[in-house]
Amino acid sequence: MAVSLNGDNAIQVVNLNKYYGERHALRDLNFTVKRGEILGFLGPNGAGKTTTMRILTGYMPPSSGSARVAGYDVSKNSLDVRAHIGYLPENVPLYLDMTVADYLTFVARLHHVKNVNAAVERAMSLVNITDRADETIAKLSKGYRQRVGIAQAIAHEPDVLILDEPTIGLDPRQIIEVRDLIRALGKEHTIILSTHILPEVSQTCTRVLIIRNGQIVAEDTPQRLGSRMSQSEHIHLQVAQNAPDIGSELEKIQGVLAVRELQGDTYEIETTLNHDRRAEIAAMAVTRGWGVLELRPVRLSLEEVFLQLTTSEEETAELVGENGAAENE
């Protein structure tokens, strides 16, 4: 069983720095991950994600600062940290000529698990591969190999799971199955999930941390990040009966900044921040006889937030220029 941790934090990172020669890869990184939390760890290539994960797993030491996992210091108690971490790297380390059960038995023994058979049975059951126990790993599909990789990460019942691109290369059905598995594992383990598939983070993670140039640029729930980045609120309105004066009438409501007609019966209404105008909009629609088919807030997607936080103004201008040039060709 996972050990009982002191306090609520399974991971605590304080003023973490890492230098590669003169390059400053991590810059005073500070964050915590609570027990039972699924943290989405995001950033562009070269942002410092892999360096952070390597430090947390004891693969390399920090240049300065500290990190604690399951209550153990990664620099002073590296072996203890590794005993309490399960790691799924992007390229799963599998011995293809072994059967599933033999491989997991081998992994459990490496971790000095006391009851190896019970640990292997539990891991296979959790990832739903018990029926493949006697199959050679080389014969498994990509999805089942990924499950075996997750099983080896949880065989010793670690407190913390670090999963690097766990659904890469999987088909849509396999992706859904692995997402469900990660959510289920989150009930017993603290999880750090690093991925480039942002919808996966929105559907799986309880909190998101975005890093750029070795620094944290945003940290919140996936839902709240979109609201924080917006300069105004946006509301989507679809009416049953369209009328030519809908836009001008809606702009009379206090706090409405602009109204944009998307199509004949659909409008996007921009309002001031922190003031929900939906009740007034609905009341006007009913009074005027427009009818309301749909009325909902519109927030920035995680993809839009990620691009805003990790793309410089020069890069944004370059992307816009390329898109414009492509449209003109």
Image (cartoon, helix red, strand yellow):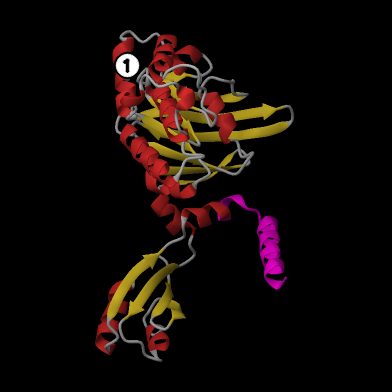
SS at badge 1: helix
Q: Residue furthest bottom?
A: 244
Judge whether residue 100 can be spotted in this image.
yes
Q: Nearer the viewer, residue 82 or 120?
A: 120
Quadrant of the snapshot with the C terminus: bottom right
Q: Which residue is mark 1?
A: 119
| Residue 202: image location, x then y, percent | 41, 49
Q: Nearer the viewer, residue 14 or 281?
A: 281
Determine whether 87 is above or below 195 in the image: above
* Three-letter residue code for mark 1: Ala
Residue 325 is situated, as x and y percent measured from the top left of the image, at: 72, 68
Q: Main secondary structure of the magenta part?
A: helix
Residue 328 painted magenta = yes
The residue segment tinted magenta is 308-329
**Quarter of the image with the N terminus in it:** top left
Q: Which quarter of the figure has residue 154?
A: top left
Identify the residue at horizontal 59%, vertical 50% (top origin): 310
Q: Is residue 166 left or right of residue 186?
A: right
- What residue is shown at x 29% (from left), y 76% (from top)? 293
> x, y percentage for residue 128?
32, 30
Asked if residue 211 is positioned above or below residue 239 in the image, the reply reads above
Residue 136 sits in quarter: top left
Does the magenta run of residues contain 233?
A: no
